[in-house]
Image (cartoon, grey):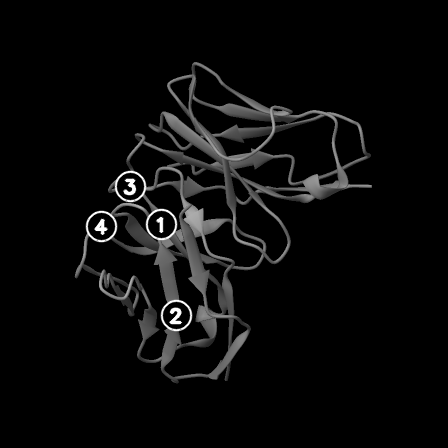
Amino acid sequence: ETGVTQSPTHLIKTRGQQVTLRCSSQSGHNTVSWYQQALGQGPQFIFQYYREEENGRGNFPPRFSGLQFPNYSSELNVNALELDDSALYLCASSSGQDQPQHFGDGTRLSIL
Amino acid sequence: GDSVTQMEGPVTLSEEAFLTINCTYTATGYPSLFWYVQYPGEGLQLLLKATKADDKGSNKGFEATYRKETTSFHLEKGSVQVSDSAVYFCALSYGAGSYQLTFGKGTKLSVIP
């Protein structure tokens, strides 16, 4: 069984740029959640997608957006990057909205 | 809003020592509680969970009991190993699963031989 995979593993961008992070959910999972983990902090919930629809959003501005595709893979897009966006971005998938989440290893985003 | 508070780290223990990592929460309803573990360079792994008051979650020798009266979910292990070195996160969510997890800041544990 293939777990949750995220790409790229590391990324460096400059302020004002845009970035797209990708996540392949675990086989059989239809729900994907995204979290931001700043250095030394716990992950913070960004949003969740269930069957291609956004299904809950945390306290993040609209420049954080996402998509879920028919195969349940997902993208996280961040526009107008700011220095504070530097973090580890974690994707988690589950077999339903109320099922245990399985996390990928994350994408480390650095903003210069 | 909901929040989770964990004891400050880092925690350094000798192998076979007893481990306690304190976790308390503030919630408007009746959440499910979780402990996740993060090994260096990896994502989070669910360690254990409890979905209602007085439930005890357990896995790999770790245990935690959902205490509604003290709003706590302390993690314990009787005898730690070097391989337990990691960052431990306490979290809550509403529902039996893990919808919209709210995490604490994490506690780094180092176990020395």
**Residue matched to label 1:** B92
**From what the image shows, is residue A102 above or below residue A63?**
below
Closer to the eye: label 3 or 2:
2
Q: Earlier in the sequence, mark 4 or mark 3?
A: 4
- What's under tag 4, amino acid-wise? Thr
**Residue matched to label 4:** B51
How far separated are the C-alphas under marks 1 and 4? 10 Å
**Residue matched to label 3:** B97
**Residue matched to label 2:** B22
How far separated are the C-alphas under marks 3 and 1? 10 Å
Is residue B89 at least partly visible in the picture? no
Q: Earlier in the sequence, mark 1 or mark 2?
A: 2
Callout 1: helix, strand or loop? strand
Name the image quarter holding residue A101.
Answer: top left
User: Are there few (<14), some (14-19), or many (20+) residues within 10 Å of tag 1?
Assistant: many
**Mark 3 belongs to which subunit?**
B
- What's under tag 2, amino acid-wise? Asn
